[in-house]
């Protein structure tokens, strides 16, 4: 199993996961169809399905176009607001090869759906592994071998951070991080929906200024950013060392928030993070998509 990390829009990631023996593939959060189709052609694979973490335009906007271009394409998600949805999935449901032609088939790739409502009420993460595959070192590159446990987390868990609570509560996010994602195997590789690692780790350093792991990870992330390289994936084990949202029981994190109850610590952290060095206002979403689809081309050409 291999993953293609695809940078799109301003700071989004979408992913193409490839089953090497069959050359079948599934996409996660296919926001920009043109770019995804370029990668599919380059890698010479057949796209069998889209796994959508949530309905926001920058994660699901490409579903309808891809469904029209690729008849029979399966689209999975947990929210009826997801465009072109063909399979509504539930927590704990496993997707795997099945002789039933109506069932999802991804070769040897197995997928477990993990319901993580908070950022949106229908947010789903996807835990993946491959049958009969040895654990391989996670050699990061644009296309590199994975270990047995990758997990696209959408906008729930980021490298050094977590998603905003748009449609949910601190209690829900605490459950997501401690009982659902936090209990996965420690070598699970975290593939998040956005590149915001440097900002997240700057905030983590403010929370724990004496945390040497945060300092080291931030220096590494800045270097990756300077070289225009992704900071994904991280591992769950690493996240517990520097991600303040997974460290709500640590004395330093509690001291920063002035709280001791884990849910209240998480709520306070999110509030502080929301007001921490906000990035510049992003361009109009529809204009961003039009640019990436090449719709502005005729207007940009010299007369």
Image (cartoon, rainbow, N blue to C red):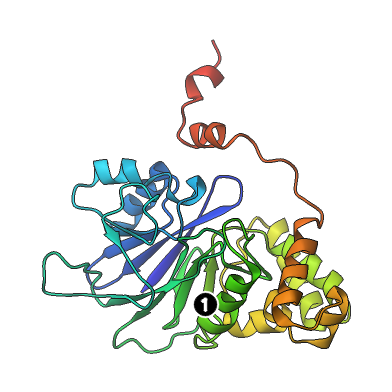
Q: Position of residue 168 (x, y in %)?
A: 58, 62
Query: Quick check: can you spot residue 138?
Result: no
- Above or below residue 218? Residue 5 is above
Snapshot quadrant of residue 33: top left
**Front in this rendered view, residue 140 or 215:** 215
Q: Give the number of marks.
A: 1
Lateral position of residue 251 relative to residue 239, left or right: right
Lateral position of residue 67 relative to residue 6, left or right: left
Q: Residue at x 56, y 64 (%)?
A: 118
Please name the residue that numbered disc 1 is placed on.
Answer: 189
Q: Where does the C terminus fall, quadrant-wise? A: top right
Q: Residue at x 57, y 57 (%)?
A: 167
Q: Where does the N terminus fall, quadrant-wise? A: bottom left
Lateral position of residue 82 relative to residue 24, left or right: right
Query: Quick check: can you spot residue 189?
Result: yes
Q: Position of residue 99 (x, y in %)?
A: 11, 74
The residue most toward the left is 100
Q: Position of residue 290 (x, y in %)?
A: 49, 31
Q: Residue at x 70, y 58 (%)?
A: 225
Snapshot quadrant of residue 223: bottom right
**Front in this rendered view, residue 187 or 124:** 124
Q: Position of residue 53 (x, y in %)?
A: 45, 61
Lateral position of residue 93 relative to residue 155, left or right: left
- Above or below residue 292? Residue 94 is below
**Secondary structure of residue under mark 1:** strand
The residue most toward the top is 303
Question: Dot 1: few (<14), some (14–19), or many (≥20) neighbours within 10 Å?
Answer: many
């Amino acid at each position: 199993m291999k993953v293609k990390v695809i940078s799109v829009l301003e700071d989004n990631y979408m992913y193409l996961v490839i089953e090497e023996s069959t050359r079948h593939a599934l996409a996660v959060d296919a926001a920009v169809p043109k770019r995804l189709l370029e990668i599919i052609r380059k890698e010479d694979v057949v796209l069998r399905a889209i796994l959508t973490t949530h309905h926001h335009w920058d994660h699901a906007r490409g579903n309808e176009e891809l469904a029209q271009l690729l008849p029979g394409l399966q689209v999975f998600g947990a929210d009826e607001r997801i465009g072109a949805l063909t399979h509504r999935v539930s927590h704990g449901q496993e997707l795997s090869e099945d002789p039933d032609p109506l069932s999802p088939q991804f070769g040897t790739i197995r997928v477990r759906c993990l319901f993580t409502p908070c950022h949106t009420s229908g947010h789903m993460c996807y835990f993946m592994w491959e049958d009969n595959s040895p654990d391989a070192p996670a050699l990061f590159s644009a296309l590199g071998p994975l270990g047995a446990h990758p997990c696209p987390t959408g906008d729930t868990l980021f490298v050094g951070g977590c998603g905003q609570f748009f449609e949910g509560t601190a209690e829900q996010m605490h459950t997501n991080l401690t009982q659902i994602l936090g209990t996965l195997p420690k070598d699970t590789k975290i593939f998040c929906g956005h590149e915001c690692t440097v900002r997240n780790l700057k905030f983590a350093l403010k929370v724990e200024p004496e945390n040497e792991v945060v300092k080291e990870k931030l220096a590494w992330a800045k270097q990756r950013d300077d070289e225009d390289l992704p900071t994904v994936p991280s591992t769950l084990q690493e996240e517990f060392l520097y991600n303040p949202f997974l460290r709500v029981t640590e004395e330093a994190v509690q001291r920063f928030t002035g709280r001791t109850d884990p849910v209240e610590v998480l709520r306070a952290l999110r509030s502080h993070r929301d007001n921490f060095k906000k990035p510049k206002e992003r361009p109009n979403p529809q204009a961003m998509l039009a640019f990436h689809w090449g719709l502005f081309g005729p207007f940009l050409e010299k007369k």
